[in-house]
Image (spheres, rainbow, N blue to C red):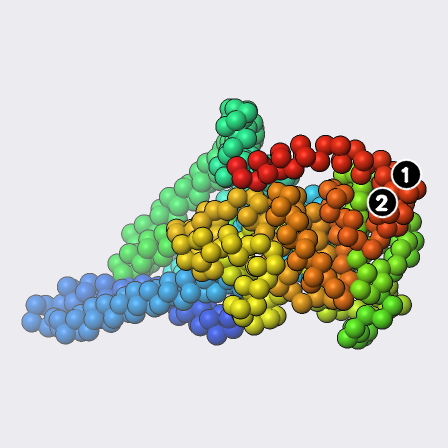
């Protein structure tokens, strides 16, 4: 491929200016139009200043040649006033342009972040398990606060500098066409060097996205409170700090190698520009000596040449930034174009007001895209309206995955799940999920007021403090919240001033409050009492029995003493249901469940004592 072809292909592939312009335009059409108008005005004014200065100098020169009595200072004063006025206009529009650019950058940045946030919530949970997608998402989210403003400024700089450059070249060409050609040709080596170095940096940044994410992870381990206890207890600071330093050192060496090579090539390109600069000076001086141009033209030629070089430099710098910024544009576009596998049907089925047949798993299988074996394999069971079932099994048996399928956070890779005989994929996912009230074992601790931590269980509901308190009482969280300085208005966590951090057990009570606050037909509790002592656990399940009356419930717990209340217990092992029935039936069968229950019963007192100590610590 020829150098010119590679140059053309590189510009088309990496700059993608049309995409950048579209991004800026849609953020604010009015600001875009205003910015473009200011670009045109600012590109004309420098040429006008130079031309007015030429007229002023030529007028002064011509006045000097006259006898003293014939000299007219008023004409000189008029031209000086014109140059001053145009210069003042240039400063004024420059200030306005900077203001518009800052506002536009903020608007574009906010719009991009809004799009990324919306897309982050909309994409499937499965996308968070794809390393390549996660790399693109990481870079798009990381760069969004500053890349769009750079794109805005880069586009404006290119537009303004290009128009001003055309004006300067036209001015130079009117004086000496050869000088204008020298300006153009002298800039080409630097253009090629900038594009080459930016392309190399672009590829390096793309290649190193996963490494940067690893650095961010190591930084979190060293700095966030989530890891602070273990880092100190096991003396891990040196280990992870050394890994961070070693990874950074590798990136630094690679970056320095690129910068060193670029510096050498840039010096060679600048040498060509300097030689061209002094060759042009020689031509301008020769024109003046032979009388080909006036003194004003001589002065303006020097200034126009220097400004033209400056405009070329601005264009090259802006192009280099846009070249690099394309990494953000590419990742942003790829991320925004992700299509959700949990799709909304073109004509979704209407959700039943009340379940009639209930939920059925029909030969359901599921395997993660990154996995080498199915997590669930041929699962079939019927969850009847008003029935409470419990899922029991060792870690990795597939219990939580089954719940995620029930919540339609994933779709089965085999079989189907039905609601009243209709495949749940035929319902609108958002409408379907309103059927469910869920609290997972890895519930979220929101750095927000206590009331809001419960209200988020159903944000479509009004902020009813009385209803929130009822939910808190059912989850045993009310007693905890009452002790806080501002009660339900106390900010929980430790990120903000005046906030109050809770223990693991206290947080779990608050998390349970969300499930109780949501008036859902199906209640799902995934290890809801893992951090609670035996007495609190008994109280929570007593409340659960009350609110579960007339509702359908799914319960996951490792404490088999808590699942005895279930109408039916499903025992999972390696992704399959190996036993099911009531507690009494399963104990009579003397199978896996019975063995697990008896083992736990033998150590029940010791286990609860340890749980109590752990919760209160």
Q: Nearer the viewer, residue 463 or 469?
A: 469
Q: Residues within 10 Å of mark 2 (few under 14, many from 20)?
A: many
Residue 246 in which image quadrant: top right
Q: Nearer the viewer, residue 100 or 428?
A: 428
Q: Nearer the viewer, residue 587 or 381?
A: 587
Spatial distance from mark 2 to mark 1, Cα to Cα? 10 Å
Are discs 2 and 1 less than 8 Å apart at CB? yes
First reached walking from the N terminus: tag 2 or tag 1: 2
Residue highlighted by disc 2: 571
- Please give the name of the residue rendered at 48% of the width and 74% of the height, measured from the top-left corner: 30
- Please give the name of the residue rendered at 57% of the width and 45% of the height, measured from the top-left corner: 505
Q: Quadrant of the N terminus?
A: top right
- Please give the name of the residue rendered at 59% of the width and 62% of the height, measured from the top-left corner: 471
Observer able to see residue 12: no
Q: Residues within 10 Å of mark 1 (few under 14, many from 20)?
A: few
Observer able to see residue 482: yes
- SS class, disc 1: loop
Determine which of the numbered discs, if any, sits on residue 591 in the image. Answer: 1
Q: Residue 542: x percent and y percent?
A: 68, 55
- SS class, disc 2: strand
Q: How many marks?
A: 2
Q: Residue 272: x percent and y percent?
A: 46, 40
Q: Residue 569: x percent and y percent?
A: 83, 49
């Amino acid at each position: 491929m020829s150098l010119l072809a590679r140059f053309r292909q590189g510009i088309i592939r990496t700059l993608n200016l049309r995409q950048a312009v579209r991004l800026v335009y849609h953020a604010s059409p009015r600001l875009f139009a205003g910015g473009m108008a200011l670009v045109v005005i600012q590109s004309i004014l420098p040429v006008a200043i130079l031309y007015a200065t030429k007229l002023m100098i030529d007028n002064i020169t011509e006045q000097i040649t006259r006898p003293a009595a014939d000299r007219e200072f008023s004409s000189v004063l008029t031209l000086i006033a014109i140059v001053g006025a145009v210069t003042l206009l240039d400063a004024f529009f420059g200030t306005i342009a900077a203001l518009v650019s800052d506002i536009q950058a903020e608007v574009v940045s906010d719009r991009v972040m809004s799009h990324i946030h919306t897309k982050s919530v909309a994409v499937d949970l499965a996308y968070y398990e794809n390393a390549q997608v996660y790399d693109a998402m990481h870079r798009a989210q990381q760069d969004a606060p500053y890349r769009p403003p750079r794109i805005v400024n880069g586009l404006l700089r290119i537009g303004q500098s290009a128009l001003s450059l055309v004006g300067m070249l036209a001015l130079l060409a009117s004086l000496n066409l050869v000088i204008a050609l020298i300006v153009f040709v002298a800039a080409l080596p630097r253009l090629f060097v900038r594009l080459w170095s930016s392309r190399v940096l672009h590829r390096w940044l793309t290649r190193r996205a996963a490494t940067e994410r690893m650095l961010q992870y190591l930084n979190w381990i060293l700095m966030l409170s989530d890891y602070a206890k273990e880092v100190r207890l096991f003396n891990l600071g040196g280990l992870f700090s050394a890994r961070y330093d070693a990874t950074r050192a590798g990136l630094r060496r690679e970056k320095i190698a690129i910068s060193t090579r670029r510096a050498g090539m840039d010096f060679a390109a600048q040498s060509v520009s300097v030689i061209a600069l002094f060759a042009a000076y020689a031509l301008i001086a020769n024109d003046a000596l032979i009388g080909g141009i006036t003194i004003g033209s001589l002065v303006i030629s020097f200034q126009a040449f220097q400004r033209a070089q400056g405009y070329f430099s601005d264009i090259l710098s802006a192009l280099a930034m846009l070249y690099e910024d394309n990494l953000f544009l590419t990742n942003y576009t790829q991320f925004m174009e992700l299509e959700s596998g949990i799709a909304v049907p073109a004509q979704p089925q209407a959700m039943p007001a009340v379940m009639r047949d209930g939920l059925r798993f029909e030969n359901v299988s599921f395997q993660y895209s990154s996995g080498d074996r199915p997590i669930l394999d041929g699962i079939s069971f019927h969850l009847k309206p008003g029935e409470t079932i419990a899922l029991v099994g060792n870690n990795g048996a597939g219990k939580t995955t089954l719940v995620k399928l029930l919540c339609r956070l994933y779709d089965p890779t085999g079989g189907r799940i039905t609601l009243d005989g209709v495949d749940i994929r035929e319902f609108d996912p958002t409408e379907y999920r309103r059927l469910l009230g869920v609290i997972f074992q890895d519930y979220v601790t929101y750095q927000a007021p206590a009331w809001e931590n419960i209200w988020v269980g159903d944000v479509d509901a009004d902020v009813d403090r009385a209803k929130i308190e009822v939910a808190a009482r059912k989850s045993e969280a009310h007693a905890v919240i009452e002790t806080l300085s501002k009660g339900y208005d106390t900010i929980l966590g430790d990120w903000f001033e005046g906030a109050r951090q809770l223990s693991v057990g206290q947080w779990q009570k608050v998390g349970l409050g969300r499930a109780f606050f949501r008036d859902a037909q199906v209640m799902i509790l995934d290890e809801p009492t893992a951090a609670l002592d035996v007495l609190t656990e008994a109280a929570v399940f007593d409340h659960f029995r009350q609110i579960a009356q007339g509702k359908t419930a799914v319960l996951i717990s490792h404490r088999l003493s808590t699942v005895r209340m279930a109408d039916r217990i499903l025992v999972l092992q390696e992704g399959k249901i190996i036993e099911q029935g009531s507690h009494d039936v399963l104990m009579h069968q003397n199978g896996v469940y019975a063995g697990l229950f008896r083992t736990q019963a033998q150590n029940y007192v010791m286990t609860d004592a340890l749980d109590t100590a752990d919760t209160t610590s």
